[in-house]
Structure formats: structure tokens, C-alpha cells
Amino acid sequence: MLVLIDKSKPAFLQRLVAELESFGFDVVVLTPSILPPDRAEVEQLSQREGATVDLVLVEAGGGLEMWIADPSTGKTSFHEVILGLYESTDAPETTAIRLVETLRATLIEYASPRNVAPPLPPRRAPEVTLPPPATRAARITIAGGGGGTYSPGGIGVMGYLNLSLRLRIATRFDVAIDGALTPTRAELQGPEGQANVGWYMAGVSAGFFASDPTAAIRFRSGAGVWVSWMSLSGQAAASYVNTGADLVTAIPHIDAGLHASMTPNLGLAAGISMGISVPEASIRFAGREVATWGRPLWIGGLALEFAFDR
């Protein structure tokens, strides 16, 4: 604590210093260049002496001038003048005690608002990462694509286009309706003439997803029955008569496929199927068998899938 006095020391100074020290203050007594000192001189003396409380004794008014400095900056943050605390005829111990009690009460009043915890600085709310919404297997899927068929027996490879509609009936099970046709016809030739072969198919099947049906890549196996319609038309050689024919057979089959998601609703599928024609399709020219078809029948292809309600 810094006590600033005039060159003439007041009679109660010694008792005042003793009272202040009894309260735990380290007291330094100085005489400023002018009295009362201005703010700049008070701050300069406070910084030099490391004091946070400065008392200026104002004998003319029987009081004191109090300054409180911020220890972190050295700047004064509080200033108050209190007069009429004592008379020149009062006993030194009375004056000293009265000044110390006034100082003590003022410090308590000054410090009391600071006893309240300062408001916490605003904090950002913690970021909460929500789990991604649960993915569910599509209930309805439409697929369109194409591929090729092969059956030993003379016709060879035939290209096809297909369309299918799948309906999920349980978590890992679905049923499908399939249809396919050949955009171009295969050609058979013999001494009797030539024939163009077209093929159409429709059927139902059931599938099972061996892996998680909501995964990005899924494996599906299945089985079903197609109804196959093979249409034959052509040009007979000389001495033969042009005739057409339609062959209708059933084709039980088993399937295996790999499905990959590109977006939540769009995906690619690659599949292969193997079936047996019942009965075997037999193609004859003038009673002579020139080709058979369907035992076995291999079908492979690619399709683009669209899920409606994933």
C-alpha cells in the first residue's frame, strides 16, 4: 500500500501505518510532487512501488483520497474522495482507526461485486454427429438390360433384351417377374432352305440374398420357371413348301447374381442363369432335325436397376 502525504507529517501517521500493517498491508510512505497528485503520478508511483492501493491524506478536509490500481496494467480503476472523517483536535489513535475502518469498508464494497463468478465466455455447443439414417432394402426394384443366351445344338448364341420387376417379401427374400426378347433373329440353313429363329420369354422366380441386402455389393441366388416361345419363319428351297412354326416350352432355371449400388436408388446387376427346356425344342426341316435348343440353356447379362422406395 502507498500512503501519500504532505512534507509535514501528520501526528497520526505513525499510528496509521501501524494499523494498516496490522491488517496485513505493506506500507510505503511517500511525498508526491504536488498534493493532491494527479492520476498519472499516482499510476507512476504505484507501478514503481508495486502498490495496488494508494491513500492520499487530505488534512485540509479531514479525510482521504483513495486510488485502486489494476495490478495487471498499472492503471487506476477506482478513485474516491472521502472528507470529514476527523478533526485536527482528535486523538491520533482515533483518527488512525477511523481512517483504517473507512478504508476497510470501502475495499469491501469495491470487492464485493467481484466475488461473483464472472460470466463464462460463450462456448460453441459440442458438435453432435448423428448416425446416418438406417438403410433398408428396396421394396420394389425395376431392372432393364441385356445379354446373351447359349444352348448347344446348332442355334448358338442369341442376344436378348430383358426387363424385370422385383418385389421384396422379406428381409432377404424377393420375387421377380421377368420378360425377354431377341432384338434380332438367329439364322439356320440347310438343303431344304433357311429359317429365322426368334425367342421370347416370360416367367417368375424367387430370390434369396445370401449377403446383407442393404450392403453396397450384394449376392443373390434364385430359382424360377420361364415360359419360352420360339418363333420360326423362313424361305424354303425349290421343291419345298414354306411353313412357319412356334415352339412353346417351360424352362426351370437357377440364378446367381451380383448387385452393386451406385447411388441410394440406382445400381448395376450382373447375373447368370442355367435352365433346362421342357420339352427340348427341336427344329426340323422337312422332317429332318437340324437343331435342338434348351438342354441346357445358359443366359448371362447386365442390367441397370432402379429402386423405388429405398
Image: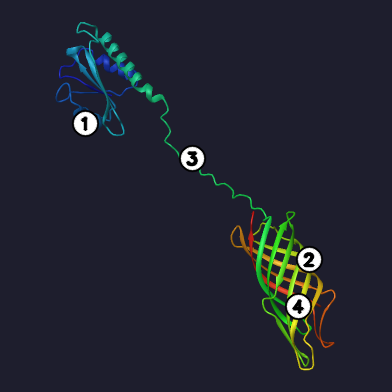
Alpha carbon separation for disc pair 4 and 3: 72 Å
Residue 308 placement, left or right of 89: right
Alpha carbon separation for disc pair 2 and 3: 55 Å
Per the image, the residue denoted by label 1 is: 44
| 248 or 47: nearer the viewer | 248
10 Å crowding of disc 2: few (<14), some (14-19), many (20+):
some
Foreground mark, 4 or 3, reads 4
Alpha carbon separation for disc pair 4 and 2: 25 Å
- Name the amino acid type tagged 1: Gln
Per the image, the residue denoted by label 3 is: 125
- Name the amino acid type tagged 3: Ala
Per the image, the residue denoted by label 4 is: 231
Disc on res. 154: none
**Quadrant in the rendering for residue 117:** top left
Residue 79 visible in rendering: yes
In the image, is residue 77 above or below residue 283?
A: above
Marked residue nearer the N-terminal end (4 or 1) = 1
Foreground mark, 2 or 3, reads 2
Per the image, the residue denoted by label 2 is: 223
